[in-house]
Each structure stands twice: as C-alpha cells, then as structure tokens.
Amino acid sequence: MARVIVDVMLKPEILDPQGQAIARALPRLGFSGVSAVRQGKRFEVELDGPADEAALGEVRKMAETLLANTVIEDYSVRVEG
C-alpha cells in the first residue's frame, strides 16, 4: 500500500481572499513577520498497490478531473514516505 499526496494551490496570478484574510488576522493574534499567506488543499490518496508510474498517472488524472480546477489551480503529486 502506498500513500500519495496531492497538493492543490491557486495559481500565483489568482487572488486568494482567504489567504489575505489570514494574513490580516495574524498580527491581531500576536504573530508578526508574515508578509503574505496563500491557502491551499491537501489530499491523501491511499493506493492498493505500489506507487509506480501507472498509479501516479492515475492520481494525476484524478487531480485534473476532480481534485483541482486546473483553470485557476496548480497541483503537485508526490509519494509520501
């Protein structure tokens, strides 16, 4: 069994209002030195078999089809552990 991580983030040119709200809230909570925050999503996909190229290709297909909106988001796929 293998675990594959899919990280999804808004593309750099896309406005991130949630990230901006978090960045504005941090100083009020006593945190300083943060100039920007971008929020994203993390998906953990457990595979029945090994994380070979065929399986990773399927996970990439999942990301493009369901997990990420590729018009406004980028994604990365990596094997954990």
Image (tube, rainbow, N blue to C red):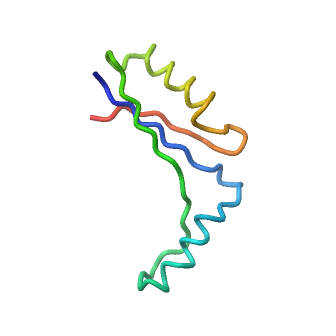
Above or below residue 8? Residue 35 is below
Q: Quadrant of the N terminus?
A: top left
Picture layout, residue 66 above or below residue 71: above
Question: Residue 56 location, x and y as percent?
Answer: 45, 22
Q: Quadrant of the C terminus?
A: top left
Residue 35 place in picture, x, y as percent: 54, 74
* The image quarter in which residue 65 lies: top right
Q: On the image, which quarter does residue 68 sit in?
A: top right
Residue 57 in the figure: left or right of residue 1: right
Left or right: residue 52 compared with residue 59 = left
Q: Is residue 8 above or below residue 77?
A: below
Query: Going by the image, does 32 lie left or right of 3?
Result: right
Residue 31 % position (x, y): 42, 81
Within the image, what quadrant is residue 5 found in? Answer: top left
Q: Residue at x 57, y 35 (%)?
A: 67
> As displayed, is residue 66 above or below residue 16?
above
In the figure, is residue 29 to the left or right of 73? left
